[in-house]
């Protein structure tokens, strides 16, 4: 495999072109940048060519890792990233998979573990073959809220709350560490109650 600094620089430029095309709703530009990225991966994957691009040592894996967004910052289309969104249903950590693959993926993780979430496990994934002419954080919020409307919300099971409490990254900034992992409900007047 021959992934050099110049290759990484070119990959970043292609990912910016891809992002611009997505935001502009430019299908031709989107397809052209997708193909340019794919060609770059094949060309730099050594003798394996098209085989194993996303294997642990494949050029796709190496390049996507090199161009991913800094954890805690919102990626653009064409980057992987881990970031927080603030929705009307609470804060959610989003693990975004680059749309250069066949599917774009949003993996939603609960942040405030005592609050209702989309699932009892504090995790839900959403794969799509569509890209939206919105910044990634806005697209993630729209996808999450649509899932809440469809599936509703529930409290996270205690076993998952305990397990997840230690796994949140520092940038998640727990709003109230004293109640992290304890189910709480906030009434319309702002009164908070603990559920045991």
Image (spheres, grey):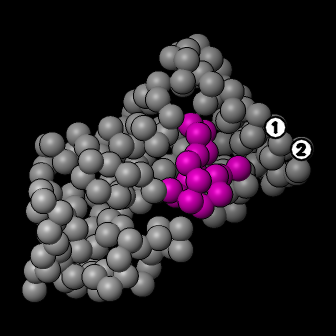
The crowd level at tag 2 (other Cα within 10 Å; few <14, some 14-19, many 20+) is: few
186 left or right of 74? left
Q: Position of residue 71 (x, y in %)?
A: 59, 61
Q: Quadrant of the C terminus?
A: bottom left
Q: What residue appears at the point 45 percent right and 75 percent down from the top-left corner?
A: 168
Residue nearer the viewer, 178 or 51: 178
Alpha-carbon distance for marks 1 and 2? 6 Å
Return the residue found at the far front: 189
**Looking at the image, is 164 positioned above or below residue 112?**
below
What secondary structure do most residues of the magenta stretch adopt? loop
Q: Which residue is mark 2?
A: 6
Badge 2 element: helix
- Residue bounds of the magenta highlight: 67-83
Question: Is-magenta flag for residue 100?
Answer: no
Q: Position of residue 158 (x, y in %)?
A: 19, 83
Q: Which residue is mark 1?
A: 10
Residue nearer the viewer, 183 or 80: 183
Q: Position of residue 164 (x, y in %)?
A: 35, 79
Q: Are marks 1 and 2 in contact (CB under 8 Å)?
A: yes
Question: Is-magenta flag for residue 76?
Answer: yes
Residue nearer the viewer, 166 or 7: 166
Q: What residue appears at the point 73 percent right and 55 percent down from the top-left corner?
A: 66
Q: Quadrant of the N terminus?
A: bottom right
Counting every numbered tag in the picture gives 2
**Looking at the image, is 159 positioned above or below residue 16?**
below
Q: Is residue 104 visible?
A: no
């Amino acid at each position: 495999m021959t992934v050099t600094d110049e290759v990484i620089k070119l990959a970043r430029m292609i990912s910016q072109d891809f992002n611009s095309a997505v935001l502009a709703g430019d299908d031709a530009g989107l397809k052209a940048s997708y193909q340019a990225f794919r060609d770059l991966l094949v060309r730099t994957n050594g003798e394996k060519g098209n085989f194993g691009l996303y294997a642990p040592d494949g050029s796709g894996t190496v390049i996507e890792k090199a161009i991913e967004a800094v954890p805690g910052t919102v990626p653009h289309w064409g980057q992987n990233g881990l970031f927080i969104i603030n929705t009307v249903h609470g804060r959610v950590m989003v693990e975004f998979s680059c749309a250069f693959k066949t599917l774009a993926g949003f993996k939603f993780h609960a942040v405030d573990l005592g609050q209702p979430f989309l699932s009892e496990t504090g995790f839900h994934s959403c794969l799509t073959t569509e890209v939206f002419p919105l910044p990634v954080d806005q697209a993630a919020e729209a996808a999450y809220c649509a899932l809440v409307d469809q599936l509703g919300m529930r409290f996270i099971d205690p076993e998952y709350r305990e397990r997840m409490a230690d796994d949140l990254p520092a940038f998640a900034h727990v709003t109230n560490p004293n109640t992290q992992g304890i189910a709480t409900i906030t009434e319309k007047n702002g009164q908070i109650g603990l559920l045991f």
